[in-house]
């Protein structure tokens, strides 16, 4: 009888558990070896795991971390699917899937093609970026339906390609919506990473997974944009252009002193530096404008007179010698004067 009893028990599964032997297994289907599960069997679900029973292709009960003694009381969906009566105690067949709900960290991502960004200062800019991310299963039922299916084993290698494409697609939107200038991207990696995480994560909800972390390690801009950034940086470092020109002139003099044939270069360098200093400091003076001749008026009607007019164009009054002016400096002269009292010009 003992041998027969052991044989009978050997046809049933009475302990169901899974110990994760790897770091990248997301779903594991428990191998019953063709045996049936005993009613009253022990099911152990460890932390960062969820167990789902599937009956003839239909999702049944979900078990969160803990230890369970299988019965019709803690398997209500399975009981309904099999039309069991309350207290039914016979072995049954079902598939048990263990889903890993831990975070899968240090996943690499990168842009294989440039991401376009519209910048207010440089226009359309092409960006290359890379970094790391982490993710986890957020809804085991949705993940089982939409992604996993009925495979016996499912690893991160099957899903990371899809996640990377979603990340690259959403990154361009995140950069555009953040409105961070290209010159300031390097100083705002943390802010942009947080913004990208909030933008990209909802796109993965339909797969039953979520991004738990997102880090931008580097963003590379085209060479011509890098040169423009370097020029802006140099101008900021220079500060006072006048002092910079003086420094350049002093450097040119030093180099010329060390070079016996550097006299011509010294003159050219010093002249250019001096001209730059004058231009930046407003030292280049414009030719002084000649003073305009004073305006004369008709003593009868007050109408402005043109220089040398002998009669008023308004009232016709004859203009006397009092309205005469010096042709050299424009100063009014007294009637009958032979020399200008201002500049001494002979009249």
Image: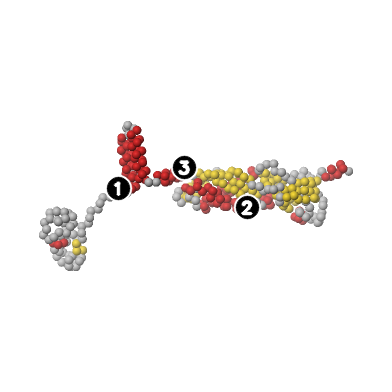
Report the front residue among 84 and 44: 44
Q: Residues within 10 Å of mark 2 (few under 14, many from 20)?
A: some
Q: Which residue is mark 3?
A: 223
Front of the two marks 1 and 2: 1
Report the coloring of the rendering.
Answer: secondary structure
What residue lies at 75% left-to-right and 44% top-to-bottom? 31
Circles 3 and 2 in contact, beta carbons < 8 Å: no
Q: Is residue 226 above or below residue 256?
A: below
Circles 3 and 1 in contact, beta carbons < 8 Å: no
Circles 1 and 2 in contact, beta carbons < 8 Å: no
Question: At numbered mark 1, what does the secondary structure look like: helix, strand or loop?
Answer: loop
Q: Which mark is residue 205?
A: 2
Question: At numbered mark 3, what does the secondary structure look like: helix, strand or loop?
Answer: helix
Q: Residues under labels 3 and 2: Cα distance?
A: 38 Å
Residue 41 x, y percent position in the rendering: 79, 48
Q: Which residue is mark 1?
A: 284
Instruction: Report the side of 10 relative to 208 (left or right).
Output: right
Name, please, the residue furthest toward the top: 260
Q: Residues under labels 3 and 1: Cα distance?
A: 37 Å
Front of the two marks 3 and 1: 1
Locate the C terminus by quadrant: bottom left
Q: Residues within 10 Å of mark 3 (few under 14, many from 20)?
A: few
Q: Upstream in the sequence, badge 3 or badge 2?
A: 2
Q: Upstream in the sequence, badge 1 or badge 2?
A: 2
What residue lies at 53% left-to-right and 47% top-to-bottom? 189
């Amino acid at each position: 009888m003992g041998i027969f009893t052991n044989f009978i028990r050997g046809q049933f599964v009475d302990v169901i558990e899974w110990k994760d032997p790897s770091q990248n297994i997301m779903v594991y289907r428990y191998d019953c070896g063709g045996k049936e599960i005993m009613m009253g069997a022990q099911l152990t679900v460890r932390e960062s795991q969820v167990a789902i029973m599937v009956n003839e292709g239909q999702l049944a009960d979900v078990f969160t971390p803990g230890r369970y003694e299988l019965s019709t009381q803690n398997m209500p969906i399975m009981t309904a699917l099999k039309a069991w009566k309350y207290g039914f105690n016979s072995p049954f067949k079902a598939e048990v899937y263990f889903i890993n709900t831990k975070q899968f960290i240090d996943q690499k991502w990168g842009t294989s093609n440039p991401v376009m960004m519209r910048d207010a200062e440089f226009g359309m800019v092409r960006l290359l970026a890379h970094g790391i991310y982490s993710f986890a299963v957020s809804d085991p039922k949705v993940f089982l339906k939409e992604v996993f299916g009925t495979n016996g084993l499912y690893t991160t290698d099957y899903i990371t390609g899809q996640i990377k494409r979603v990340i690259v697609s959403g990154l361009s939107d995140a950069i555009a919506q953040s409105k961070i200038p290209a010159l300031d991207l390097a100083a705002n990696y943390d802010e942009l990473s947080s913004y990208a995480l909030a933008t990209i994560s909802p796109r993965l909800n339909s797969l039953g997974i979520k991004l738990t972390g997102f880090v931008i390690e580097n963003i590379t801009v085209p060479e011509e944009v890098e040169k423009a950034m370097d020029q802006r940086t140099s101008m900021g470092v220079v500060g006072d252009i006048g002092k910079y020109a003086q420094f350049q002139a002093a450097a040119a003099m030093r180099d010329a002193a060390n070079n016996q044939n550097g006299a011509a270069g010294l003159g050219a360098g010093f002249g250019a530096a001096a001209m730059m200093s004058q231009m930046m400091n407003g030292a280049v003076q414009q030719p002084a404008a000649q003073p305009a001749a004073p305006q004369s008026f008709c003593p009868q009607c007050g109408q402005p007179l043109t220089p040398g007019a002998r009669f008023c164009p308004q009232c016709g009054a004859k203009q006397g010698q009092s309205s005469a002016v010096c042709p050299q400096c424009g100063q009014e002269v007294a009637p009958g004067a032979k020399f200008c009292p201002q500049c001494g010009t002979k009249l």
